[in-house]
Amino acid sequence: METTKAERIRLGIFVLLMSFLILGTAAFLIGKRITEKYVPYKTRFTESVDGLSPGAKVKLNGIVVGQVTGLEVDKEDLTAVIVNFEVSAGTPVKTTMLANLIGGISLTGLKSIELSGGAPNDQDALRGAFIQSSVSGLKQITGQAEHIAEKIEGILNNLLSITSDYNQQRLVNIATNLDNITAKTNDILVKNSKELNELPKQAKQLLDNTNTVVVELKAIESRALLAIARIDSLAMRADKKIQNLQIEAAINSANDAAKSLELLAKRSDQLIYRNQEDLSVTVRYLREAVENLKDVSRQVRENPSLLIRGEEKSQRIR
């Protein structure tokens, strides 16, 4: 079927209009590209830049301000990549800014560069200067995952080492030894329970006897002080009587004082004699208590777990 002349004219007009539209759009974009000024910069990444290619966006706080113009391997460090990019003139690029590699987790895997940091009063970066880069979030997560995996592997190795046949046998031996020590400790406590129960009573009796001796010694001390006071008084009287030339009366007073001292000495001797038996009993109780304490301390030193079993047994008795 042949087209009519009118149809061919309409088709020609449509083609011309579309051509003009395409040419106008291209001219607009080219003109904008030519008239718009860009400032080049560089950055250096020490990680893989897979997904970053020329034409990738360069953003500042989420706003597109430029694009990547080229990628090249750093000749001084083959593990690093130098990224050339440019931003629109007038974009505030500071020396304190960081170039972050973002993206790469989406379905397309494309990455871009995000500029961050800096302050209005910081120094402006020179044209073509290197902008310091930072570690991407993906690499940080990967590094942390590797570190966590290493720790988990170490824990698993330790668990395998602990649960080995040799260590299991050692744990069984330790548990058996503990049971044997506990049984021996219990036997010792049972055998010496009577002595241990009598020990507080003996200590209390010893304390009572000691208090009695102390009271009697204080009484003797009081009497001695009283005798000394009387001697002082007699001495003063004798001095006065000597001064008054009453020598004979002073001698009589001195004799009386000597008799009082002799009487005090006799009473002290009698008191000590009466309490001699109590003192010997007290000394004997002290000796027995010391021997019991030595025996208990020796048993506890040989088997320290006696204390634990002793508390459990005392709780059961209560």
Image (cartoon, rainbow, N blue to C red):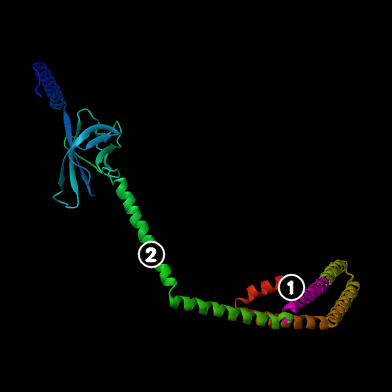
- Residue type highlighted by circle 2: Gly
Which percent across, then down, holds residue 50? Answer: 22, 47
- Residue type highlighted by circle 1: Ile
Q: Nearer the viewer, residue 238 or 61?
A: 61
- As drawn, the label of residue 317 is 1
Q: Which residues are magenta?
A: 195-220
Q: Residue furthest front?
A: 1
**Looking at the figure, which quarter contains the C terminus?**
bottom right
Magenta segment includes 200: yes
Residue assigned mark 2 = 154
Magenta segment includes 302: no
**Secondary structure under the numbered disc 2 in the rendered image:** helix
Q: Nearer the viewer, residue 35 or 276?
A: 35
Q: Nearer the viewer, residue 37 or 271?
A: 37
**Secondary structure under the numbered disc 1 in the rendered image:** helix
- Position of residue 262 in the picture relative to residue 297 (left or right): right
Residue 57: image quadrant is top left
- Residue at 57% over, 78% down: 178
Q: Is residue 43 visible?
A: yes
Badge 1: residue crowd in 10 Å (few <14, some 14–19, many ≥20): few
Q: Nearer the viewer, residue 252 or 214?
A: 214
- Position of residue 21 in the picture relative to residue 158 (left or right): left
Location of residue 94 with respect to 205 vertically, above or below: above
